[in-house]
Amino acid sequence: MRFVDEAEIRVEAGNGGNGVATFRREKYIPMGGPDGGDGGDGGSVYLIATPNVNTLVDFRYNNLHKAQRGQNGMGRNCTGRKGEHLYIAVPPGSIIYEASTDEKLGELLEEGQTLLVAKGGFHGLGNTRFKSSVNRTPQQFSKGSEGERRTLKLELMVIADVGLLGLPNAGKSSLIRSVSSAKPKVADYPFTTLHPNLGVVRVDDQRSFVIADIPGVIEGAAEGAGLGLQFLRHLSRTRLLLHMVDVQPYESMDSPVKSANIIINEVNKWSPDLASKPRWLVLNKIDRLADEVSQQHCQDIVEELQWKGPVFEISALKKQGVQTLMYAIMDFMDQQRLENSDQT
């Protein structure tokens, strides 16, 4: 399934119903007086986080959403019916902006959360409201006000526990294929991943976590080059980043250390908050190295990078060292959940 992470929609709340000017006309009651009722309020537009919606793709084909207008008032002091509110289902993790100003209106992270994005118009008043001691037969009434209309930009923030960082062809897609049922495209050329992929990793019957693969980040991404940076927002809510590095890149590619530094620099420029998240170094494709040189080669990379955090040596393709990495991640997640529960 293609992942769509952005969409623009137009929302229009319902107008308020108009009041009316009518008079009571009954046999034997010659001085009936005014009996015009008020209109009904217009319906408002809400967004609601719904778990069975997981992409924004539907909004590409249906981008206009209108709530019901209020009914006009009627004689005999009958008030018009209120317009029904419109609830638009969006995936949990959606962030909502005013398209014209980029003002953030809110975010919907949990199931059932709602956000008012367009308020319905106020009802008009019937002529009964204008009756007074000096105006026994008022002719005036008021119209309902217009409902709010606005264009919204929706962004879907992938809610994942673990995010994969790396240059194109570092092996991120191969890793997510080897540990979950997700099947992103894998090929022996760069830029095979063009949109984020999510996979659920089950380490046993009771424990699991979600891992996210995004398009590879390239040098100059902070200035807009490539695809990866526009998806880095999806990693901002992860609890752990895996920085994947190809230990034996092709001759035309950069050295492992230079490749790692490209990612480090681009993430630092894009978001200091993302750069400060826990990050593990994953040296991938060790199956390309002979056993007698693999350990020393990996150690040289770690020393040159001056890496202080955890380091794992794996082959995503051969699944070598992958199980150890997954169990370490699960232990890290369990520890974080324990710490969070203690704080609350």
Image (cartoon, rainbow, N blue to C red):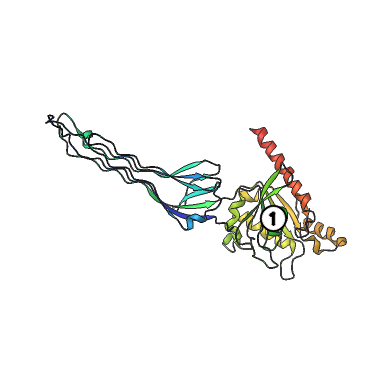
Label 1 SS: helix
Image quadrant occupied by the N terminus: bottom right
Of residues 43 and 283, the one nearer the viewer is: 43
Question: Residue at coordinates 16% horizontally, 28% vertically from top-left?
Answer: 133
Q: Quadrant of residue 142?
A: top left
Question: Where residue 207 appears, x then y in whole percent?
Answer: 71, 42
Image quadrant occupied by the C terminus: top right
* Crowd band around label 1 with a 10 angstrom C-alpha radius: few (<14), some (14–19), many (20+): many
Of residues 40 and 242, the one nearer the viewer is: 40
Question: Residue at coordinates 47% horizontally, 50% vertically from top-left?
Answer: 97
127 left or right of 211?
A: left
Of residues 201 and 310, the one nearer the viewer is: 201
Q: Quadrant of residue 73?
A: top left
| Residue that sits furthest to the bottom in the current view | 252
Q: Which residue is mark 1?
A: 176
Question: Where residue 303 appears, x then y in whole percent?
Answer: 79, 56
Question: Residue at coordinates 30% horizontally, 40% vertically from top-left?
Answer: 123
Question: Where residue 296 appears, x then y in whole percent?
Answer: 84, 59
